[in-house]
Image (cartoon, rainbow, N blue to C red):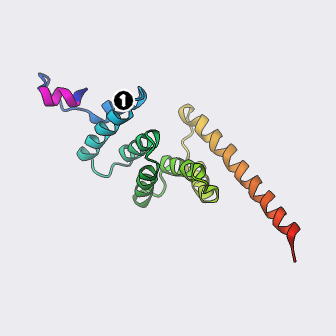
Amino acid sequence: MAFWKKILGNEDDRPVDYYSEGMDFLGSGKFHEALTSLRLALKASPGDPVVLQQIAICYTRIGMVEEAAKTYRHVLQKHPDSPGAHYGLAFILLRGDRPVESIPHLEAFLAQAPDDESTGAHVEHARWTLAQLREQGRSDQRGLDDVGP
């Protein structure tokens, strides 16, 4: 919305908050519009890990999973302790049939996860998923032990 006001002329002289606008679009399911606004926010604040992670979420929601993974990896190169990037990348790897590669990202997320109500469901989901992956790994290992020479 602010994007169009800026193009069409805006009587208000305040700068456009593209990040807030992108988050509003994201919250209302307008992922392509959110992506446009978040890219503009990124131009105003290059390399911002929060903006990049929201862009990755948009990519995921519109089915551009490889772009999302690339964006999360970019964040992790510069901010290796970013819990959100670890969480997002873990579940992309998990859905992409690469569950073993998701384990270190789930562990990193859980080691750094914020302790507040808004992240509680994500933390529990990550714990449950990690426990399932570890149990599956133990089952797979037992199966290999049974085969033997």
Q: Residue at x 36, y 29 (%)?
A: 25
Residue 12, relative to residue 63: is it above or below? Answer: above
Residue 49, relative to residue 18: is it above or below? Answer: below
Query: Does the image show residue 72?
Result: yes
Could you tell me the amino acid type at mark 1? Phe
Left or right? Give the position of 136 relative to 123. Answer: right
> Does 132 lie within the magenta span?
no
Near-viewer residue (92 or 84) = 92
Q: Could you tell me residue 90's position as x and y percent?
A: 56, 51
Q: Could you tell me residue 84's position as x and y percent?
A: 49, 46
Secondary structure that dominates the magenta span: helix
Near-viewer residue (128 or 79) = 128
Label 1 crowd bin: few (<14), some (14–19), many (20+), radius 10 Å? many
Q: Quadrant of residue 123?
A: top right
Q: Residue at x 32, y 52 (%)?
A: 47
Left or right? Give the position of 106 relative to 10. Answer: right
Left or right? Give the position of 31 relative to 40. Answer: right
Q: Which residues are magenta?
A: 3-8
Identify the residue under disc 1. Answer: 25
Instruction: Quadrant for the N terminus, please.
Output: top left
Q: Residue at x 72, y 48 (%)?
A: 132
Residue 116, relative to residue 109: is it above or below? Answer: above
Instruction: Quadrant for the C terminus, please.
Output: bottom right
Q: Residue at x 34, y 39 (%)?
A: 35
Near-viewer residue (97 or 86) = 97
Q: Quadrant of residue 76?
A: bottom left
Near-viewer residue (27 or 75) = 27
Q: Could you tell me residue 106's position as x and y percent?
A: 60, 51
